Image (spheres, helix red, strand yellow):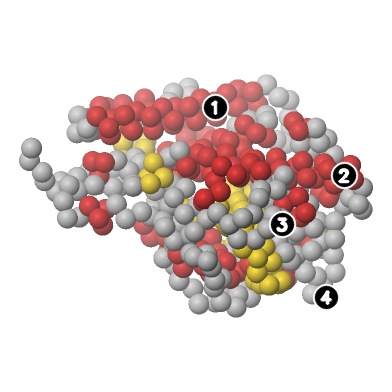
Amino acid sequence: MIITKKSLARRTFLRGLGTTVALPLLDSMIPALGAATIATKPAVRLAFVYHPVGMIMNRWTPAAEGSAFEFTPTMKALEPFRERLVVLSGLAQVNGRALGDGAGDHAREGATWLTGVHPKKTEGAGIRAGVSADQIAARELGKSTQLGSLELGLESASLAGGCDSGYSCAYTNTVSWRSATTPLPVEVNPRIVFERLFGDGDSTDPEARLAALKDQRSILDYVAGSVDRLETKLGKSDRSKLSEYLEAIRDIERRIQKAEQQNALVKLPVMERPTSIPESFEEYAKLMMDLQVMAFQTDMTRVITLMLGRAGSNRPYRSIGVSDGHHSITHHQNDPVKIANVAKIDAHLVKTFAYFLERLKATPDGDGTLLDHSMILYGSSLSDANAHTHHDLPICLAGGGAGQIKGGRHLRFPKDTPLNNLLLNMLDRAGVPVDQFGDSTGKLPYLSDV
């Protein structure tokens, strides 16, 4: 056998009639000799998954610290990922407090989660918060990817104007800020996300893309010739990987098309149009999370934020027997029935998050998996929503960070330790060192070792 250093380019695309499909990391992309170590150095991905409206904290926080902790009822769904999970208690976003501005804690929970900056209280012009951690990462990591970042959500944005006690809806609709005055809108339509990842260029115009696809034909039909040519260059293992990957794309296409067909039958108000959002929250969340996994798998982006709901979300969860709005019942005033229902929602959202971790764990990436090579922050900038507290936040960090995070532990820090300290750690381990961020006081100890 003759060994050469030839390999497929890491950024290999399948092309056809203006359609491009990025490929995951294949064995054929790794040179056979000396450059292999460099080629297989894993890219670190960052994801930030936002849990709205705080939690019932005594159902979330483990009693024991260190490696002996047990999973509480709320976080039970995360137990299969124990060795890739760090639970962090004692962290705070003190700038989410009123600080003389009065009510508006839900607007502040959204605006401060990834910025650590107290937002200006205004319903109109002059909104101001701070650059969010995901966008600091995107500026640097986006130099190596087609998309700097993806900002996704599972609940449509509120209208413009005020949404919370004198605060603009801009503060509740997103957790991502490109600059102190530029909030980034979240995308809630999986069709548009799909087109951004697999369509022509960076277009987000669904009507133009649908017309190009001619009666809902699969985009893979347009790259069939490119697939055939590529397969002749691949070994058996890579052909199998490629086949599985392309089938995953087809599956997502089918699910989006099914949702579009379902929504087309729903009578909507005249000013609205059907969207490709699945009817159930669970199907919707899984579809959006599968798209995120593909975005990481193909290295289209290394930075993603996902809002499970808007800050202050009042979505009901009828599939688990909760018909009252989420926000409404968090003001439980110690009513045991309401507390139990909020805890149900908390556990359901954590279970939804666990699906994302499961998909990352099941997706190979170089010498490990996407979960091994990612850091995923889960939590909120609000803890007890009944009391509107912004300290002792519900926070966990999942993923191995390419060997830089030691999991299987519950770490407790002194009260009011800035959450921004943890964000400094994440940025540093992603190759984006920052000396100071928001109200940070320095990086957290113990993440890599005890």
Q: Secondary structure at mark 3?
A: loop
**Cα distance in 3D space between marks 2 and 3:** 23 Å
Mark 3 or mark 1, earlier in chain: 3
> Mark 3 highlights which residue?
63
**Cα distance in 3D space between marks 4 and 2:** 30 Å
Which amino acid type corresponds to the residue marked 3 in the rendered image? Ala
Mark 4 or mark 2, earlier in chain: 4
Image spot of residue 280 (x, y percent): 68, 30
For the residue pair 403 and 264, the one nearer the viewer reads as 403
- Residue at (43% x, 52% y) in the render: 373
Count up the numbered dots: 4
Q: Residues within 10 Å of mark 4 (few under 14, many from 20)?
A: few
Q: Secondary structure at mark 4?
A: loop
Q: Nearer the viewer, mark 2 or mark 1?
A: 2
For the residue pair 136 and 444, the one nearer the viewer reads as 444
Which amino acid type corresponds to the residue marked 2 in the rendered image? Lys
Mark 2 or mark 3, earlier in chain: 3
The vertical placement of 450 against 329, above or below, is below
Quarter of the figure with the N terminus: top left
Which amino acid type corresponds to the residue marked 4 in the rendered image? Gly
> Mark 4 highlights which residue?
100
Q: Do the residues under discs 2 and 3 have CB atoms within 8 angstroms?
A: no
Q: Nearer the viewer, mark 2 or mark 3?
A: 3
> Mark 2 highlights which residue?
338
For the residue pair 431 and 416, the one nearer the viewer reads as 416
Q: Secondary structure at mark 1?
A: helix
Which amino acid type corresponds to the residue marked 1 in the rendered image? Arg
> Mark 1 highlights which residue?
255
Tell which residue pokes out farthest to the left in this image.
2
**Cα distance in 3D space between marks 3 and 4:** 34 Å
